[in-house]
Amino acid sequence: MRATAFCLCVGLAASELNAKDYRAEDLASLSLEELLDIDVSLGVRRGESHRESSAAVYVLNRDSIARSGATSIPELLRLVPGVEVTRFGSAKWGVGIRGFNGGIFTNRLLILVDGRSMFSPAKVGMFWDTLDTLINDIERIEVVRGPGASLWGSNAFNGVINIVTRHSADTQGGMLEVGAGNEEKWFTGYRFGVQLGEQKYLRAHIKAFERDDAIRPDGLENRDGWNSVQAGLRYDQGSPELGAFSLQLNAYEGAEGEELVLPDQNALNLQSLLYARAEFSGINFMTHWQYQQNERSHYSLKFYADHSERTDLLFNLTVDSYDADFQHSYRIDDRQRLVWGLAYRYTDDKLPDQYIRFTREQRHYDVASGFLQYEFAPTKNWRLITGSKLEHNDFSGSEVQPTARAIWRYNAHGSAWLAISQAKRTPSRTEHDGRVDFDYVAPQVQLQIQGRESFRSESLRAYELGWRQQFSPAVSVDIALFFNEYEGLRTLEPGALEANSAPPPAAIIPIIASNGADARSWGGELVLSAVLSPNWRTEVQYSNVQIDVDADTSGDPTATNAEGESPQHRLTFRSSWDLSGGWGVDTTLRYVDDLDGQRIDEYTELDVHVSKRIGEAVTISFVGQNLLDSSHEEYVDKVVGTPRVEVERGGYLKFKLNF
């Protein structure tokens, strides 16, 4: 069965680049040459050809998103080289780039939606169960592997992911989809778009689903079933005089079961299995104005407001945040360009005591920043880029995050690039003033895990080298290599014995958040794309990462866990094949190396998406996921203590109607 799957999946869907100016049905007919010349924007905060990028950029286009069969954003990220996605619950994912998968606390990469940050300073990372929209409304997913902090700021540490949604002019008319399966118990989505006037468009959508429980290795259900409903509205208008303006409004509400294995707060050597029904909700609003003053000067202004609430086993939080972002791109002459910008973010949160407690229940804090990037082309084949982000936050003060890059176009179809960058991962609320109290671990002795105000930012210096070559109209290769040096990684260090003045009297053993470890990592990614026939595109991806943690001076026994919590080798084959009669077959075969530090074996899995288009309006799809094993294990979050669970074989049937 595996040999047959391997033969069916030699390679994968062609070079996944920006589909900004193309419709999905057009992308399938584009050559590799045309795909390599489509603009991408994440690497330099302006549109540039992928072959001109001086970063390890990969863009998953709308055609590949639609044909993947994925029902969530983390599942889509499995299709991107260098991005490590692990699932350890119905609604729990860990996502990392080039190692250091944070599990529940995804804290070393920055997630953006239409350029706005989704990072939660209270949690130290992302709530993946709240990051949702109609998959059909995603234009593309841009990914930069490696630091992006000189443009996007702190926490663009190991990489940046930007989810770009479609312009409402491209989603006119109606769309209805419904589906059901064994893991995806049911799901539905509805969208309708209208034109309100000249260059004025509006769309609205709603999405709802219910997902089954994960299972444990003994076959019992994990009681973590997940359901959610999400709705959104987008308005776009544009004119040469006033520029382009967009407004987005989104709201969501959901719940999921949650079981955590946590140290019993009444006894150090015991563990308790806690269960609760986590609930979350939120509403957010964004406006974005862009103005092309002339062919040299372009302005952008963005404002975003968000309100979110969550109650689960770890957190009981209410967060309000407000963002403003201004950017100006100016082409000085044919060889020089300047891009600069200013940003401000204000956050007000309230975190009453839960399993994680805080020394200050309510707090507000802000982040102010500015960036400057200068591009210079000394010859037509060389381009040099230098810039820096200057940022001030209430947790670690001022941070400077510079970069220097160069790209050499040695012929019309090939380029090489190199980069040196520095990035910071700033402290979170939890690391700064959070704590976990254990009542009594011995008579009159308490244990307390503490954040501290002196906890400083983690630091990264990255060295990168890349090469791209199109060998023929049908074959291209993209290779990126990296070497990273980390300083001040978080550890939990035992502190000096303290006295508790509150009755009854007791001694406190503090375990303090510290910057007690350094590390090095190295490796690379390879993407080989090929068009085997006009109807068959293939791609192969290979990723390698090695991690060495230096924690000789640390008293934290878990400080070196990162060495064994990311797979050293990952290999992915994808194939996209259009057949006669409106049939399409898309397959993804992926191999993931074992995790020695978690006693998780290597695994190979196959996803298959078979679709049948009936006329212009109806599409019926069958999706099979993780078909090679009845279930497999991917990750165990030891920081929090999730039970060991396995990802099951799944399948669903979907009906889609356009009208």
Image (tube, rainbow, N blue to C red):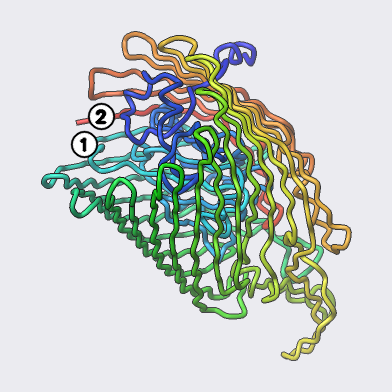
> Which of the two residues, 519 or 433, is positioned nearer the viewer here?
519
Q: Position of residue 348 (x, y in %)?
A: 46, 74
Residue matched to label 1: 174
At 45% from the left edge and 40% from the top edge, which residue is drawn? 141
Q: Position of residue 127 (x, y in %)?
A: 51, 55
- Numbered marks: total: 2
Between residues 330 and 299, which one lies in front from this camera angle?
A: 330
Q: Quadrant of the C terminus?
A: top left
Cβ atoms at labels 2 and 1 below 8 Å apart: yes
Give the residue drawn at x 25%, y 35%.
175
Image position of 619 (left or right of 447): left
Residue to which mark 2 is pinned: 657
Identity of the residue drawn at 49% across and 36% down:
76
Q: Of the two numbered discs 2 and 1 on the same chain, state the one appearing first in sequence.
A: 1
Q: Is 80 in front, or is 250?
A: 80
Task: Provide residue 264's location: percent of width, then percent of height.
Answer: 73, 65
For the point 23% across and 51% down, the residue is 235
Q: Is residue 285 visible?
A: yes
Left/right placement of residue 281 relative to residue 365 reads: left
Is 603 situated left or right of 90 in this image? right
Q: List the single residue furthest toward the left.
A: 197
Q: Secondary structure at mark 1?
A: strand
What amino acid type should be assigned to the residue bearing mark 2? Leu
Residue 550 lies, in percent from the top left, at 83, 54
Please, what is the three-letter code of the amino acid marked with disc 1? Gly
From what the image shows, is residue 478 above or below residue 383? above
In the rendered image of this protein, does residue 509 appear above or below residue 261? below
Q: Nearer the viewer, residue 272 or 626?
A: 626
